[in-house]
Amino acid sequence: MSPVETNYASRASECVLPIATQPTIANVHLRRRQHLNAGGATAAGLAGTLLALSLAIFVHPISWPEVAIFLGAFIPVHLGVTVGFHRLFTHRSFQATQGLRAALAILGSMAGQGPVVFWVALHRMHHAHSDRAGDPHSPNLSGNSLSARIRGVIYAYIGWTVQHEVPNANHYARDVLRDRLIMKIGRYYLALVLLGLAVPAGVGAWALGGWYGTLEGLLWGGLMRMFVGHNMIWWITSFAHVVGRREFDSGDRSTNNPWIALPTLGEGWHNNHHAFPNSATLDFRWWQLDVSGLVIRGFAALGWARNLQRPTLEALLRQRRGAVEI
């Protein structure tokens, strides 16, 4: 889910993308620009992370303010991706008030993974072709030898971000194109990415003081937070289609991974998700912690979300691969 230039969102909002029957945009310039933006965001995040760690080793040890700034930025922004971009806008697994929809779209944009319409179109393209030709980031299409499997995982982890085709939003995300509120927010995508860097920088200046505090806030709550957020997505696009447990027949190789579930705020229950993509919550067993699902339930309790989708027990049993009780 790599960044894409503002031009993509503006073209989408004007509905001048290729006709709906074409799944990708055959525009070499747009594809190149998108890949350059993806590479640039990755490089900036990596550089910020390396600088933050170097300062922690050679200048000033990590303290609670840096950790608090990181978590205080990472959790709401990544929830904007998992709850907003993914479960609300892509899969429409629940309905939300206009205020909540706007807040999630703004927070998700700060992640630097592209405007809402691009993110939705790309992820729907993944589901339409999961682990088959046309999947933008499957690790399972390179062959069955050990070297081919390794190449596939590397591609699905990061290589795809600068190689995949640009999805046609007019084909995959027409509902988003018609959403005036979300498209308006999408026009300010780059400004929101910068805001996601400026806010933690300001918090760092307040909490730690001076230019060094500003730098620490920018690095920990901005660039490192962005880089870690990208890696959370890459863990899912790669490892969650290779290693783990497949409890449900989902038509692909998606897996459940407890060790991925916590840092990705519940998205590591990837086989659950691919088996029931419209489910607002993914905790199909009592021990499966789904932070994003808990947040959605909290929004529902507050009256901000409604019509939460979830498979019935009969549906879960019908689609199970084995005979283990739920």
Image (cartoon, rainbow, N blue to C red):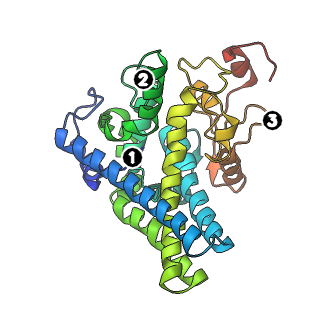
The answer to whether marks 3 and 1 mark residues whose Cβ atoms lie closer than 8 Å is: no
Mark count: 3
Image x and y of residue 228, in percent: 53, 53
Three-letter amino acid code at disc 2? His
Mark 1 or mark 2, which has the lower sequence index? 1
* Nearer to me, 200 or 215: 215
Rendered position, 283 above or below 44 = above
Image x and y of residue 127, in percent: 47, 28
Q: Which residue is mark 3?
A: 286
Badge 2 element: loop
- Label 3 and label 1: CA atoms lie apart by 33 Å
Looking at the image, which residue is at 72% across and 36% down?
A: 283
Examine the image and state in which quarter residue 164 appears.
Answer: top left
Rendered position, 305 above or below 212 = above
* Nearer to me, 24 or 46: 46
Image x and y of residue 90, in percent: 48, 39
